[in-house]
Amino acid sequence: MPIHQPQQRSAAPTTGAGEPLGVQQAEAALVEHYPRLVRLAYVVLPPSLGRHRRVLAAHGTVQRALPGARTAPDRIRVPAQSRRSSEAAEEAQGPANAPYAWMRLRVLRTALAHERRPRWWPGRLPAPAALRPTLPVVWGLRLFPRAGGVDELALDRALSTVPGAVRAAFALQLLEGLSESGVRALLAEAGEADPAGAVRRAARLGRPDRAGAQVLLHSGEFDPCTVQTRPSDLLRRRHRVRAVALAAALCVVAGTLAVAAERGVRGVADEGPAAGVTVPALDPAALLRTAAEQWADTSRIDFTAWPVRGDRRGDGELLGRALRAWSGPPAGVRVSTTPGTADVPPAQPPRLLFAGEVDGAAVVLFHDGGVRVVRYAEPLSGGGGAALDFARTDDADVTTGAAVVVSRTGEKARFLLAPWISETTTRDLLAPNTPGRPLEVGPDGVTAPVGRPAAGGACGSWPVLQLRSSERIVENHAFLVTDLGDLAPAHLTYTPKPGRGAPARQPREATGTEALLAWARTACSLRALSGSGVRAVNNWAFAEQRLPEGEASAEWLCTRAETWRGPGRVLVQFLQPAASPTAPAAVVADRNDTALCSRFGQHILAGTHWKSASGRWYVLAAGSRAVDRIEATGQVRGAAGGPTLAVRAPRDASVQLTARLREGGTLAAVR
């Protein structure tokens, strides 16, 4: 919701040094640069005000910067330091001029005053500037800038931990383009006692990517001119209206003063219990709740379509404890995060997914604006502290947003299923010929206990969930997910062997016979991926090779794990003939942070040493479908046309493998 500003006029020309500045020139500067000034005020104002009050305070700060109606046009003069800072900004950025510099100084002074308390001022109350009545005033609505991503949240959290002078120095450099000397001069003119110290501390913010921090400051997260709206707490508003009416009937004047003071105290106590955290983000009544059947009537099938479930979803005390723990975990709360997941407090009210009692604990699940799922659990009785778990879930879909771990006890786990799951079974990947067994699901969507893959020791089984999506979302297909130690289970897929002359295959669900047989031999390699924030794992059968000495064929698989944060990990596995369908494959290559075996890395070459039944050793190599020649150099030399190679070689021979691609170019073997 854009906040409208006055109709624009053309800016007045820059005044010469020492010349008076007219009121009309100041008005023109405000109109022309209004969004810029409001953004500056918003960054400098204390985040403890809460986002709603900070939006209004930013607009009020800028609008109050204009001189009063009785000010004579020739009574305004731009101080010398403001002129110098204006000239520095003009060199760096262009549009600044003397009227704008004068307006910026007034905005800066007012914004910084929100944290200044006189010595005699009570410590519980905010600074006098924060209590001053100001326009604009909004009743019945809460205003919020557009929510950014994890990086914007982290920057806002960092800004909330430093004084206003440091925030001002940071904003003046990155938003206004001022030099360090210009910032020091402007802060001194605004009345700051230690401008040099503020500049030094601001230099440490946003590192190492200051350019990225500059982009973040220009994002919607810090733009109070484009906001979203929500109603305030309607029930609480009714009580407040009654209380105010009663107070006004007793004493209008005294009541007005009392309400103003009380609103100021409550604004800090309720809206700012932790720096950078807003009232709606910590208010259980403001939690977002999706309607029960919305998932069947939306094109966005992810965690935003999950309805709230659980027998304690109306327990405000439990939800409040969970939100407060999220905003600032007290001592004794165990916090865990998957790699690449921020544990910062929510910037806006999160979505409530579940609140109920599971396996002796009260569990609450939140979804934070498309980025994270957060789980809070506290024991119902006995010792032990609460736990807080964070996991990334951005861009989840029908399969990767199908389940969340709600409880883990010993060797068992329970899942909360998405509302679009119509059929639930469990099966063992190491028993590919055994059909799945039905899994009981409670009315609140929580499954019966499911076995967890063993973290150590013998790998005798690998339990997975086989889920089927509802035909109400025109999907109606089965897929596999497995618990890899994170909140969201990983989706398992399979890409079949390349067909002769056929186009490249695409990943498909790992529920067919061929896929299950491949996963039966590679499931135990998933242990290496535990707790690393894996979103999905695909087994790609990129080559089939006839073995030397007339033996049977072997398969080459590329097992790629995609993480929620982006980078992937690749295991290249060699499946030679075996007596058991669950004999583990040999891992011949392991690569982290690579695009191999994805749509952005469709070519691969790998090799290994292999011993035949006769006792002879060979070097085997295989490439993906675009490979038309493989060469071996080093202690053994050889070449073969096509995507596979087999040459005699000693067991420990050092060999370098390269391949030529059909479309041109070469490829080195992955290690």
Image (tube, rainbow, N blue to C red):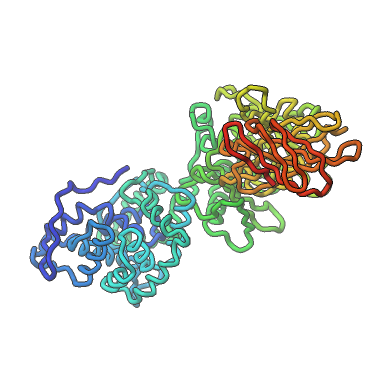
Report the quarter where the N terminus lies.
Answer: top left
Residue 479 position by quadrant: top right
Q: Residue at x 74, y 35 (%)?
A: 645
Pick the front one: 38 or 514: 514
Q: Residue at x 81, y 32 (%)?
A: 547
Q: Residue at x 49, y 44 (%)?
A: 369
Number of numbered labels in the structure image: 0
Q: Is residue 26 left or right of residue 164?
A: left
Residue 292 place in picture, x, y as percent: 53, 32
> Is residue 214 shown above or below 397?
below
Pick the front one: 481 or 369: 481
Residue 282 place in picture, x, y as percent: 48, 52
Q: Residue at x 62, y 59 (%)?
A: 333
User: In this view of the protein, can residue 441 be seen by the observer?
Assistant: no
Residue extending furthest toward the right: 614
User: In this view of the protein, can residue 100 be seen by the observer?
Assistant: yes
> Is residue 74 shown above or below 36?
below
Residue 636 position by quadrant: top right
Residue 62 place in picture, x, y as percent: 25, 58
Residue 620 place in picture, x, y as percent: 77, 38
Q: Is residue 239 left or right of residue 670?
A: left
Pick the front one: 235 or 549: 549
Q: Is residue 375 left or right of residue 74?
A: right
